[in-house]
Amino acid sequence: MTAVVELAAVLAAGLAGAGVYAGRRRRRAGGRRPDPAGARILFPIVGRALSRPALDAALRLARVERGTLVACYLASVPLHLPLDAALGRECELALPLLEAVEQAAASAGVAVESRIERGRTYRHALLELIAHERYDQIVVAAAPEGAAGFAAADVAWLLHRAPGEIVVLRPGDEGPARRAIPAAA
């Protein structure tokens, strides 16, 4: 519940022109502290929904490694706006998704950090993220043809640019138990 209050405060600050939530905040999940030497699993999010299989895979990796899941919503800033402009619409999309990740992590007993990274494109935001974030693995969900998310070209770009291990889950039949988690409208 405190995460909802914190995220609402951040949204209000973002709308007031203070920028988008980019703070580093740690949260204990299931009473377990993350191992400081444990793995950091980077989980970039784009679009309006989470891939449940990708989230499950990231949580399993973090749990096995006794590490921290670093969930990051990648926000695209239009060229006509300054890069540090407040992005109310992006916050409205990001906060429910980040909250869903935090709830899933708490249920799985995994420590989580959430943030929003901005850039001119998803690739630019991801480049900024991997440039300043410490991580051991990246878990990304490939987008189905024509959908928002990481297309084949984005995955190839990521494999070329990002150091470390990269886990890519391709889209598939996400049946009833594996349905995507949509953002609240």
Image (cartoon, helix red, strand yellow):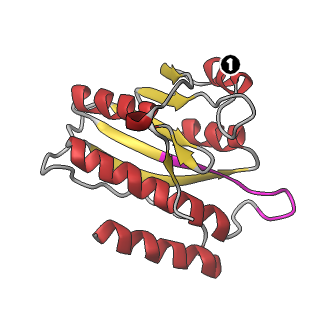
Whether residue 87 is visible to the viewer of this picture, yes or no, is: no
Span colored in magenta: 72-82
- Please provide percent x and percent y for residue 44: 53, 40
Left or right of 39 on screen, residue 143 = right
Front position in the image: 24 or 90: 90
- Please provide percent x and percent y for residue 74: 61, 48
The quadrant in which residue 129 appears is top right
Residue type, label 1? Ala
Quarter placement of the C terminus = bottom right
- Please provide percent x and percent y for residue 30: 15, 49
Left or right of 107 on screen, residue 20 = right
Left or right of 114 on screen, residue 132 = right
- Magenta run includes residue 77: yes
Left or right of 22 on screen, residue 4 = left
Whether residue 122 is visible to the viewer of this picture, yes or no, is: yes
| Residue at the image position 21 percent from the left and 50 percent from the top | 29
Quarter placement of the N terminus = bottom left
| Residue at the image position 45 percent from the left and 74 percent from the top | 8
| Residue at the image position 38 percent from the left and 32 percent from the top | 58
Front position in the image: 125 or 8: 8
- Please provide percent x and percent y for residue 148: 69, 41
Q: In the rendered image, which residue does mark 1 sit on?
A: 156
| Residue at the image position 20 percent from the left and 37 percent from the top | 35
Residue pushed farthest front?
176
